[in-house]
Image (spheres, coloured by chain):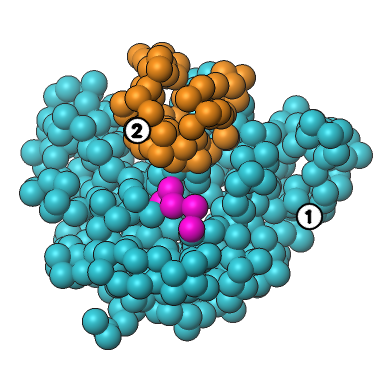
Amino acid sequence: MSEIIDLAALASSAELEQELARLAARHEIIRTRQLNEQETWTVLGAALTRELLSDPRLSNDVHTHAPHGALVPGLQVMLLEQDDPGHARYRRLVTAAFASKAVRQLEPRITEITRELLDKLGESGTADFIDAFTYPMPLEVICDLLGVPGADRDPFRKWAMDISAAPSLEAMQTSAGELFAYCIGLIGAKRERPTEDLLSELIAARFEDGTGLSDEELSSFAAVLLIAGHDTVTNLLANALHELLTHPEQLAALRADRSLVGKAVEEALRFRGSAMTTVNRVALEDIEAGGVTIRKGELVRFLLNAANRDPEVRADGHTFDIGRATAQHVAFGMGPHFCLGQRLARQEATIALAEILDRFPVLELAVPAGEVRWLASDAIRGLEELPLRYARQAS
Amino acid sequence: MRITVDYGLCDGLGQCALVAPEVFALDDDEQLVVAPDPAPELAGKVAAAARACPVRAISVEGA
């Protein structure tokens, strides 16, 4: 196996997942090239994904063991680029904010934000639903949660797109630098004048030994929660709408039985999740896996969207079917780095999908299905735009 | 083997139950339930389940 796959180039096709399945049928693990030209092992098979995501021989602490594999050189991303026991120690500081109870309490606010955005769309029209809805909704929610003032929220879309979808290494690093600088300033302001929000709580939080988080740690925390906390939901929700609108029988089933909305979200996560690829891990020793030897020091990442279509898990993986008994996916990862915000993501997507369908009995793609454009990103799976025609009443 | 769960930390994420379903399960309220006296041959799986916990709420002694 000598072929090195350029994921970002493949991703501009709607057929990416089918192509990955063809590759996965021959290799559980392949070589791909990253944005910074580094080559990395990339795990495709579901069984190997489940096995290696909890393998302590793979470290997320690339800054220590393989600095060339870092998301942003010199800036350690809190949680994502940490190993236990340190990772768990930091994660415990934020678990309460993303626990079931806290997320349930956000329901009225998520519904309110959703309805306000839908109100702006009026009775009928054509709009890019990413721009009008799936981008602003989760951004408002996470900014409210962290305490980012409304007037500061404009640059976030560019920062998030540059960092997550990463059109180029330069854009990614520039935007990450700007976001970190912004967070440092925000933390300074909240140290002087604490407010009722998660960021102020983190500033006040103390470990067992009485120490707190440094400004750099707080800034990294704020940045990762802000970006991971909205961009993933933006694309998940847009992907979910796209799948439903291109599978009319599934949409009809959901319109007929609104209790299926949670299952529709799970199937959307499985079928074409937005957090397509994990951050890099680095092998701390030689590892035999999937018929290859991963050498000590080599990078490994996981292509969750490939694992979620693995024919070993289900024969009909390329069928979008919201009626499945269980979607059984790894869209939120697995093991110690299992997505912190998964309950919030699921709740936002479930509320938004139900509200959109309630509001607009008429909802359809405003361009031919084959003409939607997919982001050429090796990390985020999503659409450039989602132009929809909508109406509150059938004409 | 003695398994202790810190229920103040446990977030009901169920990662342990994916690794060692013979020993760990979530009930309908996302409360973690641990099987009493797991067989000694499950020690490896139990250790892996403890490592899979995102908040390290599980500790194992005498494995």
In the image, what residue type sits under mark 2?
Answer: Glu
In this view, the residue in front, A297 or A162, is A297
Residue A134 position in % (x across, y down): 42, 46
Residue A216 - label: 1
**Magenta-drawn stretch, dominant element (helix, strand or loop):** loop
Q: Secondary structure at mark 1?
A: helix
Say if A259 sits above or below A10 in the image: above
Per the model, the C-alpha gap separating discs 1 and 2 is 45 Å
Q: Which chain is orange?
A: B
Disc number for residue B41: 2
Position of A210 with respect to A249 (left or right) is: right
Residue at 75% across, 56% down: A182
Residue B57 place in picture, x, y as percent = 56, 29
Q: Quadrant of the N terminus of chain A?
A: bottom left
Chain in cyan in the render: A
Is residue A390 or residue B1 the one in the foreground? B1
The residue located at (71%, 31%) in the rendering is A197
A299 is within the stretch colored magenta = no
As shown in the figure, which amino acid type bears the numbered disc 1? Glu
Q: Chain of mark 2?
A: B
SS under mark 2: helix
Q: Residues within 10 Å of mark 1 (few under 14, many from 20)?
A: some
Name the spot of residue A126 as percent of width and height, x first: 31, 50
Residue A111 vertical position relative to residue A390 in the rendered view, above or below: above
The span shown in magenta is: A53-57
Q: Residue furthest right?
A: A192
Q: Quadrant of the C terminus of chain A?
A: top left
Question: Number of labelled discs?
Answer: 2
Tell me the mark number nearer the camera, choosing from 1 and 2. 2
Tell me where residue A227 appears, x and y as whole percent.
57, 52
Residue A9 visible: no
Q: In this view of the protein, can residue B1 be seen by the observer?
A: yes
